[in-house]
Image: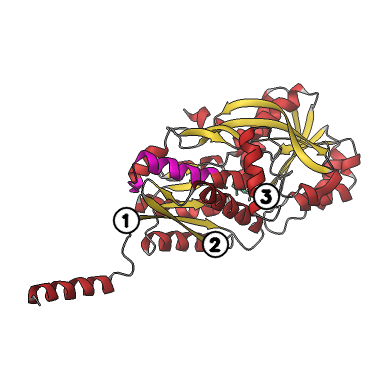
Amino acid sequence: MDSRHLTLSAVLGGALLAAPALADDTAVTVGMIVPMTGPVASTGKQERAGAELYIQQHGDTVAGKKIVLSIKDDTGAADVTKRLAEELIGNDHASVLMGFGLTPLALAAAPVATEAKVPEIVTAAATAMITEKSPYIVRTSFTLPQAAAPMADWALKNGIKKVVTIVTDYGPGADAEKWFGDTFEKGGGTIAEKIRVPLKNPDFAPFLQRVKDDAPDAVFVFVPSGFGAIFMKEFTERGLDKSGIKLIGTGDVTDDDLLADIGDSALGAVTTHHYSVAHDSPENKAFVEAFEKANNGMRPNFMAVAAYDGMGLVYQALEKTKGDASGDALLAAMKGASWMSPRGPISIDPDTRDIVQNEYVRKVEKRDGALYNVEFETIPNVKDPYKAAKH
Ligand code: VNL
């Protein structure tokens, strides 16, 4: 045996042992960080199912690379999100980070993505400024200004003159309050009161009594996905569903995932959002059918669609780069991408890296015994107005 060869293998063997895990360039790891436990666990469950369905439908190989989806539970805690992002990149050589159930969690991963030059696809969190916190952030979910401003336009056109806003007190709630409120007031409407409720252990009851006393034409609501049932229960217990005060909001409060639990008190609520399970298109019919089949009948919501599209964006980018999974190449391929989603046509604004999509005005109605957000008006190709106003 050649002694030089032996020496070389010994050296290589040593190097292999020293390195914790060598990057395998036939595989591309997508690190999905979502809350699978805690108060926003429904978002993690939906996101995971959306991403997995995309892979199931499109195969786990793209441009010669095997896609490895590594799902991590951050329990909704920002310090955990950050640590998981570092581990996914440092140990598992993740080429893409994805997920982020709440705004503070998306923000916690931003410096990690920037330093490692790894794309961070935000498929849930929706405060407008998130995409400005790292040049590597791309978003396939939505922004609250994108959803809330069209709600104000609709209210103004439909005889609503006085509104009380009630929002969860953090980033997306502040965005919803501002973009609904400013748009409504600019159009001649009056905001009688702006109420904020804590994110942790929210109790809406005392605030709802104030809403009743203010006797507005409508109450505008933002609560994050998963919190709509608590809100609606207290809304109904206070008799607000029968008070003649109209319920309007962004679609988070009448989340498709929760409508069955909320029940008939949601009937008639009008919201603006980018996705309804009842969206009438062949793409959505196929998506909903496959999703329910793969998940024991669970209805997909807007979180599931955003993760499905987030995974679709990874596939599209890898095809464009011919399998080059380096961060800058993927990021460049993601900018300006456009495709048909179950929610309708969407694209990634190449300047802001945020999503451009239709907003739909919807009303909760009963169809075949089940509740749906039935779309009745479309505002096409809405860009995030917060960033549009700055440019
Ligand atoms: C956020 C925005 C989270 C909208 C949501 O559900 C939501 C966020 C968990 O940016 O934290 O529906």
Image quarter of residue 280: top right
Which quadrant would the N terminus be assigned to in this image? bottom left
In the displayed structure, does residue 158 sit left or right of residue 352? right
Image quarter of residue 241: top right
The amino acid beneath tag 3 is Glu
Tell me what residue is drawn at x 84 percent, y 38 percent. Answer: 214
Element under disc 2: loop
Tell me what residue is drawn at x 56 percent, y 42 percent. Answer: 141
Of labels 1 and 2, earlier in sequence is: 1
Q: For marks 3 and 2, give the CA distance.
A: 25 Å
The amino acid beneath tag 1 is Asp
Stretch of the chain drawn in magenta: 309-327
Residue 185, horizontal then vertical, whole percent: 70, 27
Residue 330 among magenta residues: no
Q: For marks 3 and 1, give the CA distance.
A: 34 Å
Residue 228, horizontal then vertical, whole percent: 74, 49
Which mark is on residue 292? 3
Element under disc 1: loop
User: Does 110 sit above or below residue 333?
Assistant: below
Callout 2 environment at 10 Å: few (<14), some (14 to 19), or many (20+)? many
Tell me what residue is drawn at x 8 percent, y 73 percent. Answer: 4
Q: For marks 1 and 2, give the CA distance.
A: 27 Å
Which mark is on residue 74? 2
The residue beneath circle 1 is 25
Q: In the image shown, does 289 or 360 lie closer to the viewer?
A: 289
Element under disc 3: helix
Callout 3 environment at 10 Å: few (<14), some (14 to 19), or many (20+)? some
The amino acid beneath tag 2 is Asp
| Label pair 1/2, CB-CB below 8 angstroms | no
Q: In the image shown, does 234 or 44 lie closer to the viewer?
A: 44
Residue 320 among magenta residues: yes
Q: In the image shown, does 95 or 130 lie closer to the viewer?
A: 95
